[in-house]
Image (spheres, helix red, strand yellow):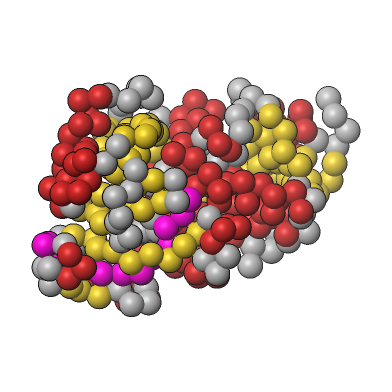
Amino acid sequence: METRRSGEVIVVGGGVIGLTTAVVLAESGRRVRVWAREPAERTTSAVAGALWWPYRIEPEALSGEWALASLAVYAELAERPGETGVRMVEGVQAGLRLDELGVWAARVPGLRETRGGEGGYAEAGLWARLPLIDMPVHLGWLRERFRAAGGVEEERSVKDLAEVHDLSGADVVVNCTGLGARDLVPDPAVRPVRGQLVVVENPGITTWFTSAEHSAAQTTYFFPQPGGLILGGTAEEDEWSLVPDPVVAEEIVRRCAVVRPEIAGARVIGHRVGLRPVRDVVRLDREVLVGGRVLVHNYGHGGAGITVAWGCAGAAARLAGGDGS
């Protein structure tokens, strides 16, 4: 057993939730180590689309506040897109109206209803200028920011959260394990929702588009990223396969080409599959264990982890005894 290190925090999980939480804790003056079984570039976060939007996440009131806190951070990071991977990009959420959204929507700058035909899109919906994040770049930037704040990353597999305090000697452990929480907590309420994407050479599209019912298994969206146009997608509940389905890929391209015909002839350059860690409600709370040791849970963000990452990180840091501001 390692020597006890009073005041140290172990963050378990190296995706966008874990790294953002680790950054906030480290910059508040805590000594922080991240334990992750795989590097950030191999996590679900790395394959995300990744547009800021509170998609399939509960509870609505809290998630709206977390999302708005994150939006403020991303708007600032977008001033350095090459460094942070964050850009502010315009686009349409087709088929949505403002009165269908929570109170958070009124605080999104420039979010407005649009008639069909605006921006070249036939469907009416909502027009907005939102953060669109190049996740490989952003995850790398988070890691560097964490290290600059004195944080340390360790590649370690955790099989029992209860043992992390003893193995590390830390006073506080923050559980940001996403889908892994299903076995580690254990919490059977965490389930995978499989998302498949296709990456094509961008034929010149500069705005994003989404058309997705909240509970639909098939969605239609595309996001212009520096490495290509990301096409989606799927939301298959309780599916665990990480192998791209070629039939599904063809259907994704076809649906996107209905919206923008030039996509039909775009060369396919890659396929991505990720498992969103969905829970009926996000778990963000604090347990006090034997001996006064603290376990903070921060998981179950589904497809909106990027959207709420900074807001949840601040809340988790406060639960852990850090500043979190």
Q: State the residue at coordinates (30%, 55%).
A: 204
The stretch of residues the image draws in magenta is 122-134
Q: Is residue 131 magenta?
A: yes
Residue 250, given in percent of the width and then of the height, sits at 20, 31
Q: Determine the residue located farthest toward the right in the rendered image.
A: 3
Q: Is residue 127 visible?
A: yes
At horizontal 46% and vertical 62% (from top left) the residue drawn is 87
Q: Quadrant of the C terminus?
A: bottom right
Dividing the picture into quadrants, the one containing residue 195 is top left
Judging depth in this view, the residue of 110 and 106 nearest the camera is 110
Question: Residue 36 in the image: x percent, y percent?
Answer: 63, 33
User: For residue 287, which quarter of the picture?
Assistant: top right
* Residue 195 can be seen in this image: no
Q: Residue at x 12, y 72 (%)?
A: 115
Looking at the rendering, in which quadrant would you find the N terminus?
Answer: top right
**Residue 312 x, y percent position in the rendering:** 52, 56
- The reply to whether the magenta stretch includes residue 14 is no
Q: Residue 187: name its quadrant.
A: top left
Prevailing SS of the magenta stretch: strand
Give above or below for 105 relative to 201: below
Q: How many marks?
A: 0
Judge whether 126 appears above or below 200 on screen. Answer: below
At a point 12% along the width and 48% down the height, the residue shown is: 258
Q: Position of residue 101 (x, y in %)?
A: 25, 66
Foreground residue, 210 or 231? 231
